[in-house]
Image (tube, rainbow, N blue to C red):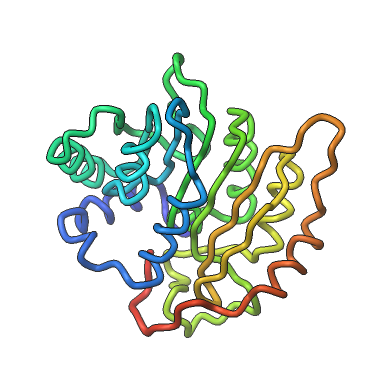
């Protein structure tokens, strides 16, 4: 991780009020895909990590039985709570939590985990730890939208700020999901350095495809859907 959790939290506290107005087309495309792929049932519980101002949690709260939003920034959480109150959403709750300590209530059985534009702040080793923690909750589906490399990393591209970001390649993420007992079922490139991965829990006796196979599939689909100049998302 390039900065400490407290430093990241302070950064997002400062930008919370105007955060939604600074989002790029690629961010919004990822958020839409994450919501679509999450596809919770009416009785499902969704855990949204790095929930921010609720871009994923709030729309999912309209269809899921329960949505739990977790973030390290109290400023972002305050914005999310205000939006939920304005929309009259009573099935969503927001509180402090992080990838490797999601602070899930004891009475919650998590069915779906979502996250968008948050995990790239972790190092590759920390991403593995986070995915292992998430897998330990035994959700049937994990949907990850984020900055990720479909090709060679290029720090001059708009989604990669080396001072705060630490994105992984699709292959590294695929390997982490495979080792945690999940198989990639969808790879959605949005930009050369932005995409959405969908992982489903592998049942007993099934074999998850190895990361190299998943990466090859991702490369075959890596034509970006949206290409527009924007500032670094971090």
> Residue at 23% of width from left, 33% of height from top?
89
x, y percent for residue 34: 47, 53
x, y percent for residue 169: 64, 66
Q: What is the residue that sits farthest to the top in this orientation?
A: 107
Q: In the rendered view, does 73 fall on the left or right side of 5?
A: left
> Residue at 81% of width from left, 52% of height from top?
209
x, y percent for residue 2: 47, 59
Q: In the rendered view, does 216 fall on the left or right side of 95?
A: right
x, y percent for residue 132: 64, 38
Q: In the rendered view, does 135 fall on the left or right side of 94?
A: right
> Residue at 59% of width from left, 32% of height from top?
139
Quarter in which the C terminus is drawn: bottom left
Looking at this view, is 212 or 5 the one in front?
A: 212
Looking at this view, is 172 or 225 the one in front?
A: 225
* Number of numbered markers: 0
> Residue at 31% of width from left, 38% of height from top?
62
Instruction: Note whether 163 is above or below 182 in the view shown.
Output: below
* Corner quadrant of residue 3: bottom left
Instruction: Note whether 223 is above or below 15 in the view shown.
Output: below
Looking at this view, is 10 or 145 the one in front?
A: 145
Q: What is the residue that sits farthest to the left in this orientation?
A: 86
């Amino acid at each position: 991780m390039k900065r400490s959790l407290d430093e990241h939290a302070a950064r997002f506290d400062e930008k919370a009020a105007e955060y939604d107005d600074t989002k790029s087309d690629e961010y919004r495309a990822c958020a839409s895909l994450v919501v679509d792929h999450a596809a919770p049932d009416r009785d499902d519980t969704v855990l949204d990590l790095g929930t921010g101002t609720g871009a994923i949690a709030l729309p999912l709260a309209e269809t899921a039985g329960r949505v739990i939003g977790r973030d390290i920034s109290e400023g972002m959480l305050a914005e999310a709570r205000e939006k939920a109150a304005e929309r009259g959403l009573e099935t969503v709750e927001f509180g402090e939590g992080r990838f490797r300590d999601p602070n899930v209530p004891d009475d919650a059985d998590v069915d779906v985990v979502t996250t968008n534009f948050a995990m790239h702040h972790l190092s590759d080793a920390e991403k593995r730890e986070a995915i292992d923690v998430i897998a330990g909750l035994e959700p049937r589906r994990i949907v990850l939208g984020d900055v990720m490399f479909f090709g060679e990393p290029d720090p001059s591209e708009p989604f990669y700020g080396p001072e705060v970001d630490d994105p992984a390649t699709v292959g590294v993420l695929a390997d982490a999901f495979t080792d945690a007992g999940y198989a990639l079922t969808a790879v959605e490139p949005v930009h050369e350095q932005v995409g959405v991965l969908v992982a489903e829990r592998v049942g007993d006796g099934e074999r998850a495809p190895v990361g190299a196979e998943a990466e090859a599939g991702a490369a075959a689909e890596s034509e970006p859907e949206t290409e527009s100049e924007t500032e670094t998302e971090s």
